[in-house]
Amino acid sequence: MSIATHLAALPAQQLDAALTALSGRRIAVLTGAGVSTDSGIPDYRGEGAPRRTPMTVDQYLSSDAARRRYWVGSHLGWRAFAAAEPNAGHRAIASLEERGIVSGVITQNVDGLHVRAGSRRVVELHGTMRRVFCTHCGQVFDRRDLAVRVEADNPWIVVPENVKLGPDGDVLPESWEDFRVPSCTVCGGVLKPDVVFFGEFIPAEKFREAEQLVHASDALVIAGSSLVVNSGIRLLERARRRRMPVVIVNRGQTRGDARATVKIDAGTSEVLSALADALEG
């Protein structure tokens, strides 16, 4: 798709300013949930998103009932992720990396869509739904294999009318009480998806990897993140301290707007595609 096609629906002045800031520079990209909305994955923090009460890691580890409730929703969420396809924004980032313009992508998402789009250097700050591990012995399992076990033990879960969802996609109580939670086949321990729960910290080595990617770059693009999570703001500050241009692309306000070199209030798929067309041209 040509740059002219993208520009027709985009704020041209801000896009021109972003291109001026980014041209000739190696770019690190930080992405949030807004990058995946065009793939059909909801953004739970964006404007108009429903209120939700996420489960904390303490609740998950201390309560059998909480784990049953979590796993019903988690399994349905994983199925949605597995069915989703990378969108134009994911593909634009991967294309820019292939051309040596993007140095890598740091993502707050756990959907794996950057990897599937072809990005090679991906720092998954909050983990990934592709893996599950045992909290006792550390054994790692592929989520696809575990899904087969979950559906064999709970055949009712594949029948949509048997699973009642609330308005935010969470599972209503009557749907999870009889759910059989998968356990570790090595030691019988508690399994946990390899994602950062509320109440957990991002692993220090993972954040250092993200910092190193920013430090090895000359500019930072933040796409689809409201920067509510402190890790995003910390990376923005690392870039500012190095006097790197920072371009934010997001529908609605973010916590970093006042600190950005350029803010583009528009959809990430359109803007990233337009930037890719221009920077690769």
Image (cartoon, rainbow, N blue to C red):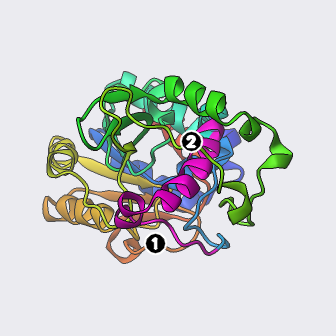
What amino acid type is highlighted by mark number 2? Ala
- The residue lying at 37 percent from left, 71 percent from top is 256
Task: Indicate whether residue 170 is drawn in magenta.
Answer: no
The secondary structure type at the circle numbered 1 is: loop
Residue 206 in view: yes
The residue mark sitting in front, 1 or 2, is 1
Mark 1 / mark 2, whichever is N-terminal: 1
| Percent position of residue 148, x then y | 59, 25
| Percent position of residue 86, x then y | 59, 33
- The residue lying at 62 percent from left, 75 percent from top is 51
Q: Is residue 97 above or below residue 51?
A: above
Disc 1 target residue:
254
The secondary structure type at the circle numbered 2 is: helix
What is the CA distance from the residue labelled 1 to the residue labelled 2? 21 Å
Image quarter of the N terminus: top right
| Prevailing secondary structure of the magenta residues | helix
204 or 90: nearer the viewer: 204
Mark 2 Cα shell of 10 Å, populated few (<14), some (14-19), many (≥20): many
Q: Is residue 111 above or below residue 126?
A: above
Point out the stretch of residues depicted in magenta: 51-80
Task: Indicate whether residue 63 is drawn in magenta.
Answer: yes
- Specify the label residue 191 is tagged with: none
Disc 2 target residue:
274
> Along the horizontal axis of the image, is 263 left or right of 218?
right
What amino acid type is highlighted by mark number 1? Thr
- The residue lying at 45 percent from left, 48 percent from top is 109
Residue 259 falls in image quadrant = bottom left
